[in-house]
Image (cartoon, rainbow, N blue to C red):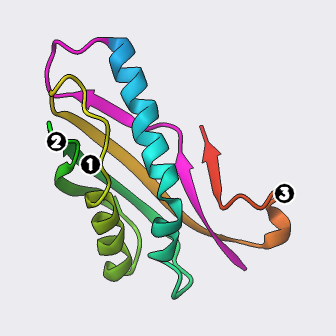
């Protein structure tokens, strides 16, 4: 069995200010997803000590300095508080893009799954789903 982290493409993203433009929101959404993917190894390391499976949906506000604030668990079906806290700590350490000095909200789903290596056609440990 091999552990993978599935990053869902259906990232929720919302501005805290109503003056944000949709093109800025789209670019920021892509940038947030990119930052999560860039840190995939750290997220995967959170679950390396066991056969962890489940979903963790986190929501946070990106402040005007680019760092997450007010991280909350929206959903957690991972039966391991250490893994969940590790994911929260990793999110907290990421500097996200700043959008015109306005804070914005992000809701991001993390799915942890075990698969057989033969079930995964390529060696990429991150899979994308719609």
Q: Which residues are magenta?
A: 1-21
Q: Compared with residue 18, is residue 98 higher up or lower down, i.e. above or below?
A: below
Position of residue 63 measured from the top left corner of the image (x, y, whole percent):
15, 40
Question: Is 8 in front, or is 92?
Answer: 92
Q: Gap in Å between the C-alphas at discs 3 and 1?
A: 31 Å
Image quadrant holding the N terminus, namely: bottom right
Q: Quadrant of residue 74?
A: bottom left
Give the side of residue 123 with respect to residue 47, left or right.
right
Q: Is 7 one of the magenta-colored residues?
A: yes
Q: Quadrant of residue 76?
A: bottom left
Q: Looking at the image, is mark 1 or mark 2 nearer the viewer?
A: 2
Q: Which mark is on residue 65?
A: 2
Earlier residue among tags 1 and 2 = 1
Q: Looking at the image, is mark 2 or mark 3 nearer the viewer?
A: 2
The residue indicated by pointer 1 is 59
Q: Residues within 10 Å of mark 1 (few under 14, many from 20)?
A: many
The residue indicated by pointer 3 is 121
Residue under the point 34% across and 22% down: 25
Q: Residues within 10 Å of mark 3 (few under 14, many from 20)?
A: few
Q: Gap in Å between the C-alphas at discs 2 and 3?
A: 40 Å
Give the side of residue 76 with respect to residue 19, left or right.
right
Q: Compared with residue 76, is residue 66 higher up or lower down, i.e. above or below?
A: above
**Number of numbered discs on residues:** 3
Earlier residue among tags 2 and 3 = 2
Q: Secondary structure at mark 3?
A: loop
Residue under the point 45% across and 57% down: 110
Q: Is 4 one of the magenta-colored residues?
A: yes
Residue under the point 36% across and 35% down: 12
């Amino acid at each position: 069995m091999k552990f993978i982290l599935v990053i869902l493409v259906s990232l929720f993203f919302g501005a805290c200010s109503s003056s944000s433009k949709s093109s800025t929101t789209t670019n920021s959404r892509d940038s947030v997803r990119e930052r999560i993917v860039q840190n995939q190894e750290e997220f995967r390391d959170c679950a390396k000590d066991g056969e962890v499976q489940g979903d963790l949906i986190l929501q946070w506000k990106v402040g005007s300095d680019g760092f997450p604030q007010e991280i909350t668990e929206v959903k957690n079906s991972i039966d391991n508080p250490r893994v969940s806290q590790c994911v929260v700590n990793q999110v907290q350490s990421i500097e996200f893009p700043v959008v015109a000095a306005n804070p914005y909200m992000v809701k991001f789903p993390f799915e942890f799954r075990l698969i057989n290596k033969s079930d995964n056609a390529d060696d990429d440990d991150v899979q994308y789903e719609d």
